[in-house]
Amino acid sequence: MKTYDVVGVGNALVDVLSHCEDAFLAETGIEKGIMQLIDAGRAVELYGAMGPAQEISGGSAANTIAGLAMLGARTAYVGKVKDDQLGAIFAHDLRAMGAVYETPLAPKSLAEHETGRCMVLVTPDGERSMSTYLGVSESLGPDDVDPEMCAGAAWLYLEGYRFDGAASVAAFDKAIRATKGAGGRVSITLSDPFCVNRHREAFRKLIADHTDLLFANEHELMALYETDDLEIAMARVSGDVEIAAVTVGARGAHVVTPSGRSHVPTAATKVVDATGAGDLFAAGFLAGLAQGRDLAHCASMGCVAAGEVISHVGARPEADLGTLMKERGLWAR
């Protein structure tokens, strides 16, 4: 039996969330609905211009690991923070959820960078526009990856955003080798169309060579295959990976395999803040796999988890996910 159901690797960030009107995005030069990388100076500038904000531990893969831990899965996380105030918040919050987090902290003496943060601006339609200062999360490298931890994972979960770092590919390679070498499987999330456009060929190679399960929303998948037709994109991905879980917003999710495709609807939910929807979908889906559920059941669990997180501000669940699953007849553990 494996030590962990899922080990995640990603950008360790603290989200700084604020509500705004579309006009504020235009005034500050922020492109709506995507993630843009910024430097420390821009982070300070935006923070000064934003309205009242909440600081909540985030990071895409970390959100997924937190959701999995809430669902009773055995989890661990690899991501870099500094030994500073935001770093302490991040580490405490993840461990408090029940996840193992042992990545060495960047020392206080490191003057160049701080713990990364994501400035999340939420417009009245619930769409989130993210400006991300990676900080020390960008320095994650092979030395931060514990091969024994990865070898103990049934599933490795890789965050596409983490491609934005000089040593990131080497860190991913080390984690993949350790996981696959011990009989584990590899999943990856594409994270964002903007991210796909930066790293399309690297993503395609990783998916074709090493990935067992791909998570993407419709826009990310179409960007991956350079088409504006989702049907074409799903046909393409069915030849590249064993399982693809493709979310389509309020319409639910498609599960695509080489042998066919199924669709799972989602319950109507008022969107307050879409931050973390894909992260929590992945958490529900992987939790279902950890329980030995079929793929449609896994997708239904993903839709429930995503529906919870978009109903409030912040990318971590507020309601008990296990209780929600039980209420919908999806929970057995």
Image (spheres, rainbow, N blue to C red):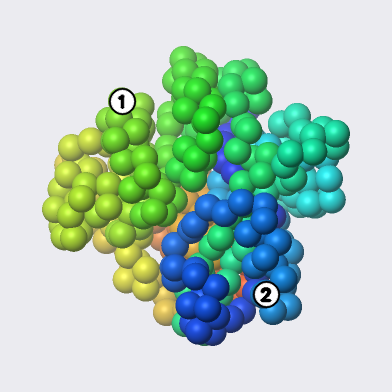
Q: Amino acid at mark 1?
A: Asp
First in sequence, mark 1 or 2: give its number.
Answer: 2
Residue at the image position 32 percent from the left and 65 percent from the top: 248
Residue at the image position 22 percent from the left and 43 percent from the top: 237
Is residue 144 visible in the rendered structure shown here?
yes
Structural distance between the alpha carbons of marks 1 and 2: 44 Å
Residue at the image position 67 percent from the left and 56 percent from the top: 41
Q: Is 332 left, or right, of 136 in this rendering?
A: left
Residue 45 placement (x, y as % from top left): 67, 65
Q: Amino acid at mark 2?
A: Ala
Residue 215 placement (x, y as % from top left): 38, 48
Residue lying at the far top of the rendered structure: 181
Is the residue marked by circle 2 packed among few (<14), some (14-19), or many (20+) residues within 10 Å? few
Residue 209, disc: 1
Tag 2 secondary structure: helix
Q: Is 147 left, or right, of 26 in this rendering?
A: right
User: Which residue is more in the foreground, 15 or 134?
Assistant: 134
Q: Which residue is mark 2?
A: 49
